[in-house]
Structures are given as C-alpha cells and as structure tokens.
Image (cartoon, rainbow, N blue to C red):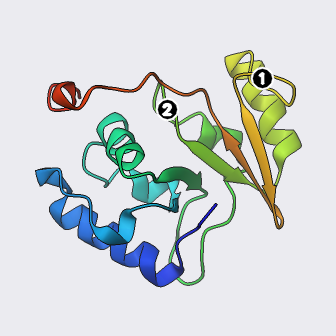
Amino acid sequence: MHTLSRASLTQCIARYAALGWSGYVPDACRQGTLLIPINIAKWMWGWPNRFLDRMQAVDTQIHLLGPYSGGGFSEGLDDPQLIDQLPDGYSGGISTDAPDLVMTWLHAAHGGVGRNASNGRIRAGCDIWQIRLRPRPPVLSSAISHRR
C-alpha cells in the first residue's frame, strides 16, 4: 500500500477541491492511498459516492481519519459518534488506532462487520489499523454523471 506523503496529500486535496467539479482527478491523487480527515472529506467534489468511484477508477484507496483541527496531523477515527456520521453506503476505509472499540461498535451498529466477517478487511500498519468497510458494486463510467 502506497500512502501519499503529507505534501502530496495536500496537493491532491487542494487540486481536487478546485478542479474535481469537472471530473478531473489530479496526478497527485492517483495510484495510492489517501488518508483524509472526516471533516475535510465533505469538501471533496462528489462526496461520497462519485468521489469514491473516481478514486477507485485511478487505483486510489480512501481511508478516513479523525477530524483535522490545524497544526499537526489527524489521529485515527476512534470516536463511534464520528463513525456514525459516515454517509449511508460509505465503501471506503477508516484508519483507527483503537480497532477493538471501533470494530465492536461497527458490529453492534451495522451488523456483520467484525474481526472475522468476510465483508470487512483489516490491515495493520505501524500503530494504525485500517478497516475497509463493505464494498459497493462498481459503477459503469457512463452512469457516474447520473449518480448523486
């Protein structure tokens, strides 16, 4: 898994925020993993479905982090109340440093998402766990412009 550097991530988000309305995906956003704070994600053109479809089309995975409040970098998405704010059908991932808490909450709130569930994948990297939620079926490119 290739995670973008902080500079590349900043460049990707700024360029996509400016040009994403046109369907353009900047080179800085391609073929990697974007770790996006949950409070920034809603600014991405087409959030959530169209944005996730566009990133999937350029071989990029999306994982949400906890809120960004300036200064350093965001921490993992560990608060169940924040996870509850994910849009219905969200098919990206979340990055957390409290997997037991998050997985227990996801299992109770949404059923079937758990450590042994076949519909979720868990990847451990350093001290952050990345949990991939249920994938949505792919969308044909001709139908993307008609989705909300």
The residue at the point 83 percent across, 45 percent down is: 99
**In the displayed image of the protein, which residue is found farthest to the top?**
111
Seen in the image, is 110 located left or right of residue 101?
Answer: left
Residue 94: x percent and y percent? 63, 47
Q: Position of residue 132 (x, y in %)?
A: 65, 39
Q: Is residue 123 left or right of residue 148?
A: right
Is residue 86 or residue 12 the one in the foreground?
Answer: 12
Q: Quadrant of residue 2?
A: bottom right
At mark 1, the secondary structure is helix
**Quick check: 118 left or right of 144?**
right
Q: Check disc 2 and report its element: helix, strand or loop.
A: loop
Q: Residue at x 53, y 40 (%)?
A: 92
Whichever of labels 2 and 1 marks the residue nearer the N terminus, that label is: 2
Nearer to the camera, 122 or 44: 122
For label 1, the residue is: 107
Whole-number angstrom distance, CA of label 2 to CA of label 1: 15 Å
In the rendered image, residue 53, in percent from the top left (x then y), is placed at 35, 39
Callouts 2 and 1 close, C-beta under 8 Å? no
**Quarter of the rendering occupied by the N terminus:** bottom right
Task: Inspect the image, locate mark 1, and give the three-letter code of the amino acid beneath it.
Answer: His
Q: Residue at x 46, y 54 (%)?
A: 60
Residue occupying the point 51% across, 50% down: 61
Quarter-of-image position of residue 126: bottom right
Could you tell me residue 86's position as x and y percent?
51, 36
Residue kind at label 2, given as amino acid type: Tyr
Q: Name above or below for residue 107 compared with residue 141.
A: above
Q: Which disc, if any, is residue 137?
A: none
Identify the residue position indicated by label 2 in the image.
90
Quadrant assignment for the C terminus: top left
